[in-house]
Amino acid sequence: MHFDWSFFQHLLFHPPGSFVGGAVRTIYLSVIAQALGTGIGLVLALWRRSRQWPLRLFAGGYIWLVRGTPLLVQAVIIYDGSSALGLYSFGTLNLGFMSVPGIIQAGIVTLALNEGAYMAEIMRAAIDSVDKGQTEAAESLGMRHWQAMRHVVLPQAMRVVIPPLGNEFNNMLKVTSVLSVIGLQELFLAAEDYNSATFRTFEIFLVAAIYYIAMTTIWSFIQSAIERRLAAQGGEVVSGIPLRQRLFGGGLAAVPGEMRGAR
Amino acid sequence: MTGDQVSDGGLAVQAAGVHKSFGALKVLDDVSLDVAVGEVVVIIGPSGSGKTTFLRCMNHLERIDGGKLYVNGHLIGYRVNPDGTLAEESHAEIARQRQEIGFVFQHFNLFPHLTALGNVKLAPVCVRRAGREQASAEGRKLLARVGIEDKCDTYPRQLSGGQRQRVAIARALAMKPKLMLFDEATSALDPEMVGEVLEVMRELAAEGMTMVVVTHEMGFARGVASRVVMMDQGRIIEAGTPAQVLDEPREERTRAFLSKVLH
């Protein structure tokens, strides 16, 4: 079998609806799951530092469990397992302006819960990277501990979080493909289905790969814009990160301090 | 509130037999000191003598292990149980006590993500619930008072060391404290910037602010202090007027220390 150029070109520039739908699903699953996962990560990171030991224990246990098991297994347990056991069955959710199929909900929940554990570690490192003198200064002004956290520590920690967060989102775009195991029609499963009808495996997955790399590349530009804006807010003059570094790695983001090279 | 929790109203600080240890190391060993309202007390002594720790105890950045420490008339950081033992105060109450105590750090601890004005108005807005307009107006006034009204919208990293420390003083003053604590406020500055910070402190003293100042600036001690306290190895070994302590020290250790500092 030879490489079918016209098939490849046609698929790349005039993809069927299932392909486009899969790519769109990959993007919105990633965005929503990353947003939720970041929120979960922040809460877990704060709980790990809580004065209440049950919160510390829960957060520590959660992170241990989630990071210790494969995402693939988590997806099957959450969607198929919980339904098989009669624990919970994801049904269609009607939001008024749109309805969300159960499988999409399960996909988002799986990715968000999983991502939360990793984001918790990133948040914890970022919070720890803020000098202790910052909290002392805030508390010496009569601010409560949570006020110091909210107004002084977290804004500084967030700047440190952005580069690894960008990394996480890059990973998230690709890791959505795991949800094909529960039958969610994201980009990978759409490609697989198309493949089983045409058997043009190489061409089809090459197109899928090109779609993935387009998404991650566009994201890397968005991330660089966010980093510049944040740096500018701090009154920092940032020279642009060279495109080569941004795409091929080795780039250190223009944020202060300790997180550099931490991952 | 029991009578035991309130001290003589004429005293800003009343320390009676204060003890503190870091592990086996005794940092404060039976320290007693009264500071009257309106007084400027300068604490001198070699590094490791406990002067910074003592100052940090005065706004409960450090806990004390024994004795009693009243600040602005209240037992700082502790309350007396009915059986006479001490228990740590609630976090809310500690924060409330700290609102009346300004603290200036050796390394400024300015909030790098906020402008000079943002630094000054943060605590009034978030703790005192001051209106943003009013807090900004008062913040500008305070920055003018320390001589940098033109730097309101500048971020800390763009300021010189002396300017940073003046912002830090304005930030502490924004809470309208009854007592100001200075922890080696000029030690991290380049020599040519020490003068501008000392000048602000001098003006503050002249306006009648009660101050406890840990410093190595003997000129400031001589010119501004109502009293000079010499600490060594966690104890106050000598106290008196600047003339007594600096010119005719009774203690050999004071003499040895002064000869090193004054060259």
Image: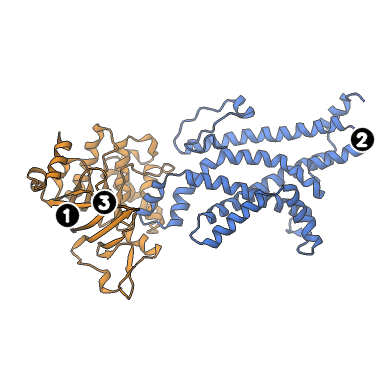
Label 3 resides on the chain identified as: B
Amino acid type at circle 2 is Thr
Instruction: Identify the hue of chain B.
Output: orange
Q: Residue at x 80, y 56 (%)?
A: A80
Label 1 environment density (alpha carbons within 10 Å; few <14, some 14–19, many ≥20): many
Question: Badge 1 is on which residue?
Answer: B39
Are callouts 1 and 2 both on one chain? no
Q: Secondary structure at mark 3?
A: strand
N-terminal-most mark, 3 or 1: 1
Q: Indicate the secondary structure of the residue bearing disc 1.
A: loop
The tally of labels here is 3
Mark 2 lies on a secondary structure that is: helix
Q: In the rendered view, does B16 fall on the left or right side of A135?
A: left
Q: Residues within 10 Å of mark 2 (few under 14, many from 20)?
A: few
Q: Colour of chain A?
A: blue
Please determine whether, in this image, residue A158 is positioned above or below residue B15. above
Mark linked to residue A155: none
Dot 3, how many residues are within 10 Å of its Cα: few (below 14), some (14-19), or many (20+)? many
Work out whether disc 3 and disc 1 sit on a shared chain. yes
**Foreground residue among A236 and B7:** B7
Tell me residue A109's x, y (percent): 70, 53
Vertical side of A8 occupied by A186: above or below: below
Give the x, y percent position of residue A93: 76, 59
Q: Which residue was labeled with disc 3?
A: B181
What is the distance, in whole Å, between disc 3 and disc 1 at their CAs? 12 Å
**Disc 2: which residue:** A198
Give the CA distance from mark 2 to mark 3. Answer: 78 Å
Q: Residue at x 25, y 59 (%)?
A: B18
The three-letter amino acid code for the residue at tag 3 is: Leu
- Kindly identify which chain the residue marked by label 2 belongs to: A
Type of amino acid under label 1? Glu
